[in-house]
Image: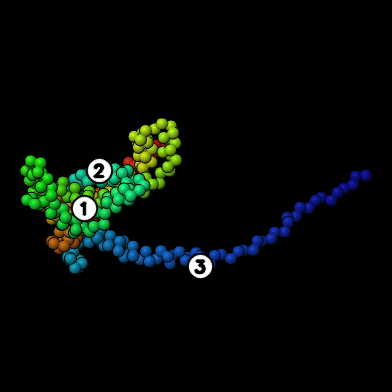
Amino acid sequence: MAVQTPPRTTSSPPTTTAPQRPGPPWTEKWGGLFFVAPFGVLFAFFLLWPTLSGLWNSFFNTSLAGVQQEFLGLRNWQEMFGDPAVWASLRNTLVFTAMSTPPLVVIALVMALLANRQGLLGWFLRFAYFAPFVLPATVVTLIWVWIYQPGFGLVNGLLTAGGFAEIDWLNTENRAMLAVVITTVWWTVGFNFLLYLAALQGIPEQVYEAAAIDGASGRQQLFRITLPLLSRTTGLIVVLQLVASLKIFDQIYLMTDGGPNYATRPIIQYIYESGFTSYRIGYASAVSYMFFLVIVIVSIAQFRLFGGRKEADR
């Protein structure tokens, strides 16, 4: 006789719901906003609002008092593209950038290599190289205007001592920009030097010890260890220096006032003259935005260039 077993009944285990943990208090979720709020307010008030206001004013014939007098549409922009002074000033700015950036990078690297040593000489070189950077623009330009003066200036004194004729550096069209570039290199190379020095001190000493054991000479260590490991710092310095050189204004305004015959007038000085001398805030805003786009394009090109090199090095 077959014994029939009752069918098994499947029953799902009783479900128990895990107790819900209470969420983090609102002070942990939103507390960070209180820390960034002061910066956010300052950023919006001093950067975001002036930026948007400048773009808005570029479409108006706006007076210096900020009163919008007349809507011009794109007429300020059309006038800007046909203004030869804009392109001459932009060309001067690009020439200054091309002349000043390479020496500011190369000289800073050489100075960092010389100062990257222990002892009293290393500390003296660090102080001597960085000291001009802390001077204000007025002091620097006053010093170099005297140095360039004909008759009693140091540079012309050296030229006459060597049998050469004196040069009126700041009043000669093809020499004034070179004089400003030399002054700028002397004044601002200390910042790039500091970045290179910090990067050099970050390279492990064991790398050089291993290379020396393998018989690498000092030149081989420089070109195969030091410079490749400084490539990222070099990229950063080039980008920062390009942007800083494109924004040249102080030393040119104080040394040559854009002369002689507008040969050294940068684009920022032309923007200043359009807005605060000719009282054309709308037109100056349009030129400012054109120059802003130039800086953005140069920065993106530099990032793409050094980004491509990093990918190639991998």
Q: Sequence-wise, which precedes: disc 3 or disc 2?
A: 3
How far across and down, in percent of the image, does residue 158 sit?
12, 45
Q: CA distance from mark 3 to mark 2?
A: 53 Å
The reply, left or right, for residue 243 in relation to residue 70 is right
According to the image, label 2 marks what residue?
102
Look at the numbered disc 3 and give the secondary structure of its residue. helix
Per the model, the C-alpha gap separating discs 1 and 2 is: 16 Å
Q: Residues within 10 Å of mark 1 (few under 14, many from 20)?
A: some
Q: Residue under label 3, please give it.
A: 26
Mark 3 neighbour class, 10 Å CA radius: few under 14, some 14 to 19, many 20 or more: few
| Residue 151 can be seen in this image | yes
Query: Which mark is in front, 3 or 1?
Result: 1
Q: Earlier in the sequence, mark 3 or mark 1?
A: 3
Asked whether 21 or 187 is in front, the reply is 187
Label annotation for residue 248? 1
Circle 2 packing at 10 Å, graded few (<14), some (14-19), many (20+), is: some
* Label 1 or label 2, whichever comes before in sequence order: 2
| Mark toward the viewer: 3 or 2 | 2
Does residue 79 show up?
no
- Position of 112 with respect to 30 (left or right) is left
Q: Amino acid at mark 2?
A: Pro
**Residue in view at x 19 percent, y 68 percent:** 65
Q: Residue at x 22, y 46 (%)?
A: 100
The amino acid pointed to by label 1 is: Ile
Residue 265 locus on image (x, y percent): 15, 52
Which one is in front, 256 or 141?
Answer: 141
